[in-house]
Image (cartoon, rainbow, N blue to C red):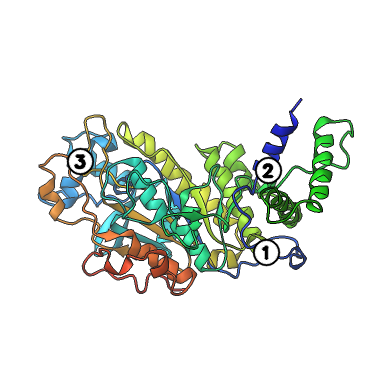
């Protein structure tokens, strides 16, 4: 039997725990089915571990031994699991496993198992930010915190601070919705008086959109069933306490939180009851389509959250796909993950197939990891921690293409040294700040206060990054 105190703890921890934000009136939520998406929404996907996007977007093979397209394949052959001394193997790898595309004055490849990404790029809906950098550190935890917070001054031993998604949601007058098992700091909102702290009044944690809120009594359940009796008992208990305790007291706030959760969950449950999970999305987490069922569940959560965007007052959302630290066997390690995200019939393709037109038109996805990988493969057929990397911004409102020099010739000379990095030339403040301005005009400088003085690669401008 579940003890009463543990049941209370579990009930309050289910679903919308961390904050209920600026909740709309229940009476305003009437329509069934997928709600219109008439507000601009940013979806952030964190790839923790340091994804090697140079593996996803390599230069075209070139037989000239002095060219970037030759020296790259020579230096990176091991991480592609091919011979480091066979130019014909490099050429075959390029020809057989990559779609050739053009952008930024160069030809590069997109992995053939990432067909959805290729189509989106061809449609002009993918911006590749070259030489992007958030952290100059090669430490995972420190760099992840910098990326989540959007704060390059974040110290390694600091423990507080808001996230850039929480700041953007606040600036846009809405909520940040965490669709991960545990909310990322990206969603943490700004403290009203202390910029070193955070306030989660505008963050909603929804690890399972189909099971949000508190336990409810099933009218058809056995009245002697322990859980049903506990649910009835708790509901009556909190209802009675609302009339007895001062609302501003410590216990009064708990009682009020319980009331707001019960009030808030009902329109979500009603909405989703009229909206069956599309079979393709269900297969992402229960049909073996993806290597990561967890990411499939997050895609379903995102679909549901967009369907309930009016109830949630959602302006930003957070997802994650972890495990990109490819020190060994990189090809076999990261290519299934890349396929999970970008492949035909996989996560993002299936999501888009099931989104109505207005949701596609008003949703932008940003994808990044905390740092990149080094220019040369290591002896274990992988790559070690680097600094600069590529970052992606995807969606119909995006003016796609390449922003920055994907393959600076200055990197060739670095290949003779130890632990060479991609140079970080453009700080995250610049391109993410531009997306913030699209979500809420004028918010980029608020979300990223150091944007005006942050680095940007010469010749690059993000003034026209967002077309919508």
Report whether 56 appears left or right of 116: left
* Pointers 2 and 3 in contact (C-beta within 8 Å): no
Q: Distance from label 2 to label 3 (Cα)?
A: 50 Å
- Residue drawn where x is 61% and y is 49% of the image: 206
Pair 3/1: label in front:
1
Residue 1 image position (x, y, % from top left) = 76, 25
Q: Nearer the viewer, residue 37 or 230?
A: 230
Q: Is residue 64 visible?
A: no
Query: Count the marks: how many?
Result: 3
Q: Distance from label 1 to label 2 (Cα)?
A: 27 Å
* Residue at numbered disc 1: 35
* Pointers 3 and 1 in contact (C-beta within 8 Å): no
Q: Secondary structure at mark 3?
A: loop
Residue 178, above or below 5: below
Pair 2/3: label in front:
2
Give the image quarter of residue 382. top left
Residue 137 image position (x, y, % from top left) = 27, 46
* Residue at numbered disc 2: 12
Q: Does label 3 or label 1 sit earlier along the sequence?
A: 1
Residue 402, above or below 146: below
- Residue drawn where x is 48% and y is 55% of the image: 198
* Residue at numbered disc 3: 376
Q: Does label 2 or label 3 sit earlier along the sequence?
A: 2
Report whether 221 appears left or right of 27: right
Q: Nearer the viewer, residue 430 or 298?
A: 430
Residue 428 image position (x, y, % from top left) = 34, 59
């Amino acid at each position: 039997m579940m003890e009463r105190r543990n049941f209370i703890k579990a009930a309050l921890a289910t679903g919308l725990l961390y904050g209920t934000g600026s909740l709309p009136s229940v009476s305003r939520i009437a329509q069934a089915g997928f709600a219109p998406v008439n507000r601009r929404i940013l979806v952030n996907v964190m790839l923790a571990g340091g994804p090697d996007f140079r593996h996803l977007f390599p230069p075209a093979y070139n037989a000239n031994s002095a060219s970037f397209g030759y020296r790259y394949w020579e230096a990176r052959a091991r991480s592609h699991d091919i011979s480091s001394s066979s130019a014909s193997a490099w050429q075959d790898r390029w020809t057989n496993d990559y779609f050739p595309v053009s952008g930024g004055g160069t030809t590069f490849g997109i992995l053939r198992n990432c067909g959805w990404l290729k189509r989106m790029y061809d449609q002009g809906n993918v911006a590749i930010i070259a030489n992007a950098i958030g952290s100059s550190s090669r430490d995972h935890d420190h760099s992840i915190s910098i990326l989540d917070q959007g704060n390059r001054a974040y110290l390694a031993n600091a423990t507080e601070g808001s996230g850039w998604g929480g700041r953007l949601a606040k600036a846009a007058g809405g909520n940040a919705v965490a669709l991960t098992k545990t909310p990322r700091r990206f969603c943490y909102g700004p403290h009203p008086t202390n910029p070193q702290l955070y306030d989660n009044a505008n963050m909603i944690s929804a690890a399972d959109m189909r099971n949000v809120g508190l336990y409810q009594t099933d009218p058809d359940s056995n009245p002697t069933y322990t859980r049903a009796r506990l649910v009835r008992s708790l509901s009556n208990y909190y209802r009675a306490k609302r009339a007895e305790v001062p609302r501003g007291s410590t216990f009064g706030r708990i009682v009020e939180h319980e009331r707001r959760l019960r009030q808030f969950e009902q329109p979500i449950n009603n909405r989703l009851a009229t909206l069956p999970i599309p079979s393709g999305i269900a297969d992402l987490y229960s049909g073996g389509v993806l290597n990561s069922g967890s990411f499939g569940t997050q895609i379903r959560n995102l679909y549901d959250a967009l369907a309930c965007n009016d109830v949630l007052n959602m302006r930003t959302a957070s997802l994650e796909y972890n495990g990109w630290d490819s020190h060994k066997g990189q090809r076999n390690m990261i290519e299934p993950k890349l396929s999970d995200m970008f492949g035909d019939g996989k996560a993002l393709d299936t999501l888009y197939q099931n989104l109505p037109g207005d949701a596609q038109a008003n949703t932008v996805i940003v994808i990044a990891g905390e740092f990149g990988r080094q220019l040369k493969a290591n002896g274990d057929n992988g790559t070690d921690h680097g600094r600069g990397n590529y970052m992606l911004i995807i969606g119909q409102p995006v003016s796609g293409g390449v922003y920055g020099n994907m393959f600076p010739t200055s990197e060739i000379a670095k290949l003779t040294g130890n632990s060479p990095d991609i140079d970080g030339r453009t700080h995250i403040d610049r391109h993410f700040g531009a997306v913030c301005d699209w979500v809420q005009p004028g918010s980029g400088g608020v979300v990223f206060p150091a944007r005006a003085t942050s680095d940007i690669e010469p010749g690059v401008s993000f003034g026209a990054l967002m077309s919508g």
